[in-house]
Amino acid sequence: MLRALFIAMSESRSLRSIAERSSFGKRNSARFVAGIGVADAIRAAAAMNQIGVSVSIDNLGENVTNADEARASAQLYHHLLDEIGANKLNANISLKLTHMGLDVDETMAYDIVRGLVAKAAAMTPKNFVRVDMEGSPYTQRTLDFVHELHRLPGNAGNVGTVIQSYMRRAEADVENLLSERIRIRLCKGAYKEPEPIAFQKKSEVDANYVKLMKILLTSATTSGIYHGLATHDETIIRQAKAFAIAENIPRHAFEFQMLYGIRRDLQQSLVKDGWGMRVYIPFGTEWYPYFMRRLAERPANVLFIAKNILRK
């Protein structure tokens, strides 16, 4: 019930407009969003690095409406890569294709992302671009983009994507990506999708996640592909750790991934025990859809925010 409510709220333009302009909304999103500018994201990334956590930085935004907006988004990411290099951060970048103009001009969006991947691949040390997954209308186009980009000379290992375990097609997509040695971030999924294409029951989504997790961890040892397991679910994390130990998969062969501001205690515990840990750090003014989807994924976050409000 709460998940459906927050997903619906994430899609409301009127609520988004009110929230993103209000001091109340900005204050209560600060737990999960590093700030509005590149400098805010860089500071947050440096703080994470200091406690042994690597990061991926995401400028929040999607579905730009013209070429100028898309190019401005790309320029910000170029600046972000420059700052990551200048500050010698253990950080990469994550982006959405609709933020790069996919709905405006597909060729332009491809050229924009190709330029960012080329820049990341030319850095010393090499960097990495994660092409995020959006709703189901974009799934195949996103995968096609990533396959094409990964095949370009010099790009292998420097671009990857995301697979959502609630999608019924996920296992086939994983196998196709692995056949080309493309890095995968596995998550459960945070969009509202119909039953014919997505599992609806949590038990089904979780079971598919564990199945795909085992495939990814096995490929980490057989093929040396470095994957990320994005989850805050302690039951699944325990299963992943047990599988890695039982199969003699080194702790540095893959990483757990979590979101900025969520389960910081668990993040630090995993680092302390020697497991790879990456935190996704979002920043920017367009934080409302992201914030609502985080509440949809983990309703316990609502209680945290309520407590904060009562303290004010």
Image (tube, rainbow, N blue to C red):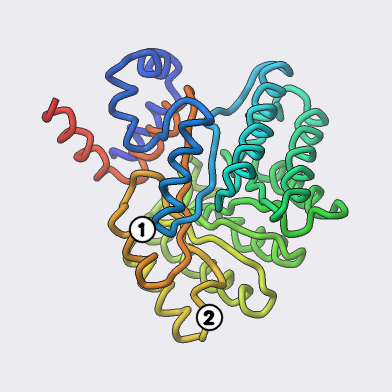
Q: Measure the alpha-carbon separation of dots 2 and 1.
A: 20 Å
Depicted 298 relative to depicted 186: above or below:
above
Q: Which residue is mark 1?
A: 267
Q: Position of residue 34 (x, y in %)?
A: 42, 34
Q: Position of residue 84 (x, y in %)?
A: 60, 43
Residue 141 placement, left or right of 185: right
Q: Amino acid at mark 2?
A: Ile
The label shown at residue 249 is 2
Secondary structure found at label 2 = loop
- N-terminal-most mark, 2 or 1: 2
Depicted 42 relative to depicted 184: above or below:
above
Depicted 88 relative to depicted 236: above or below:
above
Quadrant of the image occupied by residue 226: bottom right
Q: Sort mark 1 into few (<14), some (14-19) or many (20+) by Cα contacts within 10 Å.
A: many
Secondary structure found at label 1 = helix
The label shown at residue 21 is none
Residue that appears at 51% across and 85% down: 247
Q: Amino acid at mark 1?
A: Gln
Residue that appears at 69% across and 27% down: 75
Q: Sort mark 2 into few (<14), some (14-19) or many (20+) by Cα contacts within 10 Å.
A: some
Q: Position of residue 183 (x, y in %)?
A: 65, 60
